[in-house]
Image: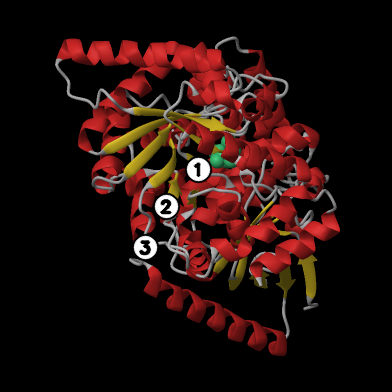
């Protein structure tokens, strides 16, 4: 077996060593060949076997789901899949195609899938139209059986030694992996701040994205070394390389173990300045990891993840329960719930396809724009958050603000939500703080008008960089242009911090830059005292805070503020981190 290396973008550090498991994708390549005369019956029976296998697979999953505490929606989804599988247009028509065209079963099946997908696309009802994705998923399952690669991504005894290799993983895919402990992730596409990368990072497993053709070059079960820190994947390593990496892996784990001693230590600089280190979470279950890593608050709860991997919308009660769990779990510490940032790359089929049809979703009906266009959905969320505010210190954070009118409209809806709760005698924190994400350049440039209406702000550097540099954060073709240290970005961040500090409005950074250890001193030097990041970064960042003397770095930070020269900036940054 030849050994070779693949390069990509390491989006989650550390070293994983394990066997490859290829994840299927809608573009699963299917060969087309003619079967020998008289071979049609055998081909049809091959297809029947595969369909029966998938039926059993679904039944097995159904048993696991309904036996455990999985949400009812998963069972509903499996019902839909079983219905599709049993429909003669999928299970019978391909047999006729095999008999008539003397083609292989895989080809017949994908031909019929295309016909069905076309038919679904003609349906007017948005919900039914989106069921085409389920047809594709079912066909993929059958194809995997036919191609001899059974087993979708699902728990197995060896998953700790398994590295998932996929063309792409959606945030919805990755969120499912939270309950499984895979050794690592590897994808052909994606950027460092794509939501998929963010979720992978929150799983604290090494991940490399943008390898371009890993899924073509790597075969099932091949041994892989994935080095997320150095952006490289080694396929079929020889013995000496493997030994070297096992050693490195041991060192990395030792380093993590040492960091654990800092869990309950307050994050204070050498010269006595206190820094708040908060956690970003996607689901209530992430709370454990946040507390385990010493988070003193939740700086960003990406509530839209409650929408992923389900049919239908989360009800007010269901949302309330999720928010209450986090609020109560953090005791009196701040819990910042961001209102739904749906649209762009976080889609859900229960949303009527509204955001999905946008030709340019990142600039379309996303986040607060979407919520204001769907006031009922927004009111439901605001009521749920308010109800939870009775059980802890909850704050509301509004994403993607571009103009103050959006704040006014949000505040009006919030007042309405409060009123309905008052009428019903439901307790809530009437003084709940409302903050805004600063992630559109317009919000920085007009920051004083935003600060006048908000209780706090949080800089979303992931989107701020995307919108300022016009670089799609999920597109690896332009990921080399995605530059947090671009002078324009540093200037915007400094401007936001200066504005907020002057107005005495608390400001944080909750984008990925907050978890970048080489940027910690720079952000602190620019006047930031609150950082929110993935729990897995908290201790590394705390260690950097503990070894920072703000007085001593002042002059270098001033020079960074003044320079536009990338080479000079790099050397000043090195000096800052020495
Ligand atoms: C950001 O844009 O920096 C941010 C924190 O929000 P998200 O990554 O969820 O868009
Ligand atoms: Mg954002």
Label 2, label 3: how far apart the Cα atoms are: 9 Å
Instruction: Residue 330 in the image: state x and y as whole percent.
Output: 28, 48
Mark 3: secondary structure: loop
Q: Earlier in the sequence, mark 3 or mark 1?
A: 3
Give me the residue at 24% from left, 47% from top.
331
Give me the residue at 72% from left, 24% from top.
360
Task: Give yes or no for contact between labels 2 and 3 (Cβ–Cβ under 8 Å).
Answer: no
Task: Give yes or no for contact between labels 2 and 1 (Cβ–Cβ under 8 Å).
Answer: yes
Per the rendering, the mark at residue 508 is 1
Please tell me which residue lies in front, 208 or 145.
Answer: 208
Please tell me which residue lies in front, 51 or 242.
Answer: 242
Ligand 1 image position (quadrant): top right
Q: Can residue 264 be seen in this snapshot?
A: yes
Give me the residue at 24% from left, 27% from top.
429
Q: Earlier in the sequence, mark 2 or mark 3?
A: 3
Mark 2 highlights which residue? 276
Relative height, residue 158 to residue 344 (above, below): below
Per the rendering, the mark at residue 565 is none
Mark 1: secondary structure: strand
Instruction: Residue 391 in the image: state x and y as whole percent.
Output: 21, 36
* Displayed quadrant of residue 7: bottom right
Quarter of the picture containing the C terminus is bottom right
Badge 1 crowding class, 10 Å Cα cut-off, few under 14, some 14 to 19, many 20 or more, is: many
Mark 3 highlights which residue? 266
Please tell me which residue lies in front, 255 or 130.
Answer: 255
Q: Earlier in the sequence, mark 2 or mark 1?
A: 2
């Amino acid at each position: 077996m030849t050994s070779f290396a693949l390069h990509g973008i390491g989006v989650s550090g550390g070293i994983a060593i394990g066997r490859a498991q290829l994840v299927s994708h809608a573009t699963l390549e299917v060969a087309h060949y003619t079967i020998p005369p008289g071979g049609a019956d055998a081909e049809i029976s091959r297809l029947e076997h595969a369909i029966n296998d998938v039926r059993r697979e679904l039944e097995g999953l159904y048993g696991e789901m309904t036996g455990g505490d999985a949400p009812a929606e998963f069972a509903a989804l499996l019902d839909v899949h079983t219905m599709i599988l049993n429909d003669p247009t999928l299970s019978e028509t391909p047999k006729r195609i095999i008999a008539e065209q003397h083609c292989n079963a895989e080809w017949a099946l994908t031909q019929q899938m295309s016909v069905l997908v076309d038919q679904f696309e003609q349906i007017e009802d948005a919900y039914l139209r989106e069921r085409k994705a389920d047809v594709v998923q079912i066909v993929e399952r059958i194809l995997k059986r036919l191609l001899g690669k059974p087993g979708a991504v699902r728990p197995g005894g060896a998953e700790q030694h398994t590295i998932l290799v996929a063309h792409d993983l959606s945030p919805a895919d990755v969120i499912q992996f939270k309950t499984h402990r895979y050794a690592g992730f590897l994808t052909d596409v994606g950027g460092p701040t794509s939501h998929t990368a963010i979720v992978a990072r929150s799983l604290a497993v090494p991940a490399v994205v943008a390898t371009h053709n890993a899924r073509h070059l790597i075969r099932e079960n091949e041994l892989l070394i994935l080095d997320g820190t150095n952006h490289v994947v080694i396929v079929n390593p020889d013995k000496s390389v493997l030994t070297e990496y096992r050693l490195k892996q041991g060192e990395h784990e030792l380093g993590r173990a040492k960091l654990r001693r800092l869990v309950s230590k307050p994050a204070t600089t050498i010269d006595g300045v206190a820094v708040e280190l908060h956690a970003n979470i996607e689901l209530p279950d992430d709370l454990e990891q946040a507390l385990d890593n010493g988070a003193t608050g939740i700086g960003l709860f990406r509530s839209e993840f409650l929408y992923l991997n389900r049919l239908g919308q989360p009800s007010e009660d269901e949302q309330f329960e999720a928010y209450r769990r986090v609020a109560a779990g953090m005791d009196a510490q701040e819990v910042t719930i961001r209102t739904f940032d749906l649209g762009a790359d976080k889609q859900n089929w229960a949303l009527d396809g509204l955001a999905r049809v946008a030709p340019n979703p990142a600039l379309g009906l996303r986040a607060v724009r979407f919520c204001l266009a769907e006031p009922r959905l927004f009111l439901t969320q605001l009521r749920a958050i308010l109800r939870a505010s009775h059980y802890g210190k909850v704050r509301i954070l509004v994403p993607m603000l571009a103009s103050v009118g959006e704040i006014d409209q949000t505040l009006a809806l919030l007042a309405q939500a409060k009123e309905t709760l008052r009428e019903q005698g439901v307790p809530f924190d009437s003084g709940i703080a409302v903050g805004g994400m600063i992630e559109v350049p317009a919000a920085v440039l007009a920051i004083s008008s935003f600060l006048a209406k908000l209780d706090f702000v949080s800089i979303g550097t992931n989107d701020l960089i995307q919108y300022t540099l016009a670089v799609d954060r999920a597109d690896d073709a332009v990921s080399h242009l995605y530059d947090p240290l671009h002078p324009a970005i540093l200037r915007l961040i400094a401007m936001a911090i200066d504005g907020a500090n002057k107005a005495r409005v608390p400001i944080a950074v909750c984008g990925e830059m907050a978890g970048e250890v080489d940027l910690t001193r720079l952000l602190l030097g620019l006047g930031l005292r609150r950082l929110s990041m993935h729990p897995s970064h908290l201790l590394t960042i705390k260690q950097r805070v503990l070894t920072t003397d703000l007085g001593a770095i002042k002059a270098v930070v001033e020079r960074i503020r003044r320079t536009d020269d990338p080479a000079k900036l790099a050397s000043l940054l090195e000096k800052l981190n020495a």
